[in-house]
Amino acid sequence: MFESNIYEERRNRLKKHLQSGIVLFPGNDESPINYSANTYPYRQDSSFLYYWGLDRPGLNAIIDVDQNQEIIFADELTIDDIVWMGPQPSLKEQVLQVGVAKILPSEKLDEVIKNAINKNRPLHYLPQYRFDNLLKLTKLLHKDSDEINKTVSKELIQAVVDQRSKKSDLEIKEIEYALKISYEMHTTAMKMCKPGRYERTIVGSIEGLAYALGSLTSFPIIFSIHGETLHNHSHNNMMKEGDLVVHDSGAESEQHYASDITRTIPVSGKFSSRQREIYNLVLQMQEKAIAAIKPGISYKKVHLLACKILVGGLKQIGLMRGDTEQAVAAGAHALFFPHGLGHMMGLDVHDMENLGENHVGYDAQTKRSEQFGTNFLRLGKELEPGHVLTVEPGIYFIPTLIDQWKAQKRFSEFINYSQIESYKGFGGIRIEDDVLVLNQGCKILGDSIPKNAEKVEEMSAS
């Protein structure tokens, strides 16, 4: 964890955002796989980590804004716990490390919340994404479970988004650490990627590598010869000559800050001429988008820039035609690029997504598009120094989507369907890096993982 003053300062800033009331932070408990004693690797809630820093189950916390008081509710470990888990720092020692002086037993939380409700005090809490915490709040607040996320505090959501969106130097250092692990994962995958091997062989190796380096993966690894399926978590295919593999993975630092990198690898060790042509177009989309990132520009504008580069490149190849601006405005590009350019990143790989993408990625000035493709852009608002975001354009040939649009003659003035038929088995290509917005321009974080086509081929051959 960080020094105690970091958490104290974060909580003090939060209090200044809120007028009055009690702020409730339910911590995550263990999550069972198939029975209560057999659990998934533990992961604390990210907002709890941000404000309270304690990475263990059995915790809840409140901030009483009016009384300027902070309380953690938890119970000391029993001798049975110690027999199974070994000696642990005392609860008092742990909470002092994050600048909290007051501890109450877990059972006292119900009394404190009931007292606040009886006095009609404002009660602030964030949206809940785990059913055990949803049930916990159902009992505490005496509400039906379907009411809980309908009565969250928008004031608190906005305050948390404002704080967590801008990363400090300490947080950037954590992300850079996670990216060092990503470097090892991605370069190892490039070296291991050979015809005749199953995808799961590489996935098992690089996930084990993350664990060996003291990390968890920040999301389930995407590693597939069917890269046209955007979030493909199947790893059962044998790789063959001529296949392309989309490898999208990330790691977490010890403080749980994430990395998120994508590379596309030729299984044969060399891109074919057709693969190289599409690959270089995706790389151009990414490099031009990164070059455009600076404070004050909306990420929606950067996304649309990448879309225009895509259309221009596909026109040269013969897969699209017509006016580039009109094609993008109509949404014709989304046949090949049906997702957004990127998202915020930090303690969550899709940072604060549980608070609602529209709260995190949009604001009063920037509204979310309803157009297919652009509606999946998770981040659209103006960028500010301290934002960390992903830049991950792609080009995909999705047979079902191609067949549907072709049958509907959708955007036939822009799309050359007769030429696309031969690309149906192509798969997909995506290239992704993590970028920090600076006071002027931006910076790609982490060590340089090969992405130039020749560099990828060189690493694959090593």
Image (spheres, rainbow, N blue to C red):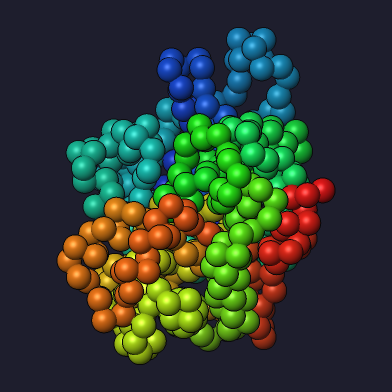
Front residue of 432 and 140: 432
**81 horizontally vs 68: left or right:** right
The structure residue drawn at horizontal position 47% and vertical position 64%, both measured from the top left corner, is 395
Image coordinates for residue 458, horizontal then vertical, percent: 78, 56
The structure residue drawn at horizontal position 59% and vertical position 76%, both measured from the top left corner, is 284
Image coordinates for residue 244, horizontal then vertical, percent: 57, 51
Image coordinates for residue 97, horizontal then vertical, percent: 71, 43
The structure residue drawn at horizontal position 31% and vertical position 80%, both measured from the top left corner, is 414
In this view of the protein, can residue 396 be seen by the observer? yes
**95 horizontally vs 16: left or right:** right
Front residue of 85 and 382: 382
Front residue of 223 and 401: 401
Quarter holding residue 240 = top right
**259 horizontally vs 318: left or right:** right
- Tag count: 0
19 to 182, vertically: above or below: below
Front residue of 368 and 19: 368
> Which residue, as the protein is rendered here, is positioned at the far left?
408
Quarter holding residue 200 = top right
Image coordinates for residue 393, horizontal then vertical, percent: 51, 67
In this view of the protein, can residue 207 be seen by the observer? no
270 to 52, vertically: above or below: below
The structure residue drawn at horizontal position 68% and vertical position 40%, both measured from the top left corner, is 194
